[in-house]
Amino acid sequence: MTDVTSGGTSDEPLDAYSRVVTGVASALRPSVVSVRVLSGRGEGSGSAIVFTGDGFLLTSAHVVEGASGGGVTSADGEEAPFDVVGADRLSDLAVLRTRGGFAQPATLGDADRLHVGQLVVAVGNPLGFAGSVTAGVVSALGRSLPAREGRTVRVIDDVIQTDAALNPGNSGGALAESHARVIGVNTAVAGIGLGLAVPINATTRRILGELMGAGRVRRAWLGVGGLTVPLSPALAAKVGRREGLRVVEVVPGSPAAAAGLYLGDVVVTAGGTPVTTAQDLQRLMLGAEVGRPLPITVFRKGALVDVVAELVELRVR
């Protein structure tokens, strides 16, 4: 029998694209579980990724917010209760724990190696359909995701945009590359054909480590808003890169204001680390920098100027 779409026979082996997607699905479906959450608002659901052999799971913080109980269900239908080890609303990540050996752990990858146009596969439990698989490409990198909580709007930075189909219930599920390494945690459906995922990278791993160890993430607060801008050729040659971070907001009373940072300053280094994006500064705000002085070099009125900010801990209500 002839296959019209391929021009060949119906018993031809899978094409290269299908082999990748089926391989990722086969590897990851045992590691992605369904989450049922009980809270004061009623019952909710989502997905989670088993990432250690002793029962730690990774999901979206909004999936388990306010949880008073609930359970997880594996791909083969086995059920178990879970505990919320810790949640971080600013990254929309949470760590849960169930009994060891409940499901096969997934391998975490590195989203910093992704490229726009790269094939990705999403595995989750949308609309209650367990173990659903969709595929697409990385549509964009470095997106910002505004998330509203009452009257407060917070921004989750550096998210992955994909056209892999996502629906309610996918949140907390896996976004993986072609070798079945998890490079993102699906977090939102932004519109038709537009899904977003929190990346798995060095920053995420630090967040997971703090959630597993302390149940919370400590962050410093600097109090600036910035925008990536090109540097002049002379300055670029001097600092060894082409971009810096222009200060577009300084919060009154913040460590940045006390240190003498001003609107229009262009940050080129902080703590000896090159700064070109807002994410570069945010990475420095995690745990280890809380309570420590942070030297910052800015370009101001034609000269490089050094200031020191005394960082304080960010309190999230």
Image (cartoon, rainbow, N blue to C red):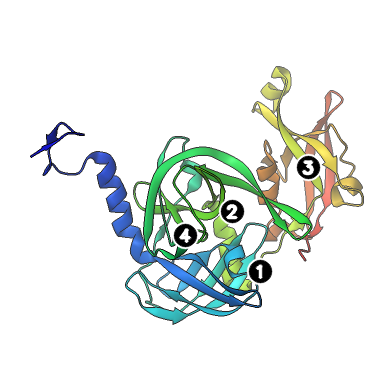
Q: Could you tell which of marks 3 and 2 lies nearer the N-terminus?
A: 2
Mark 3–mark 2 Cα distance, whole angstroms, equals 19 Å
Which amino acid is tagged 3? Gly
User: Can you identify the residue that label 4 sits on?
Assistant: 173
Q: Secondary structure at mark 4?
A: loop
Q: Nearer the viewer, residue 288 or 229?
A: 229
Mark 1–mark 2 Cα distance, whole angstroms, equals 14 Å
Say whether residue 66 is left or right of residue 245. left
Mark 1–mark 4 Cα distance, whole angstroms, equals 21 Å
Which amino acid is tagged 2? Thr
- Which mark's residue is nearer the viewer, 4 or 3? 4
User: Can you identify the residue that label 1 sits on?
Assistant: 216
User: Can you identify the residue that label 2 sits on?
Assistant: 203
Where in the figure is residue 7, as x and y percent of width and height?
A: 15, 31
Which amino acid is tagged 1? Arg
Residue drawn at 80 percent across, 45 percent down: 224
User: Can you identify the residue that label 3 sits on?
Assistant: 225
Residue drawn at 88 percent across, 37 percent down: 262
Q: Nearer the viewer, residue 139 or 202?
A: 139
Say whether residue 313 is left or right of residue 48. right
Where in the figure is residue 107, as x and y percent of width and height?
A: 40, 59
Q: Visible in this render: residue 105? A: yes
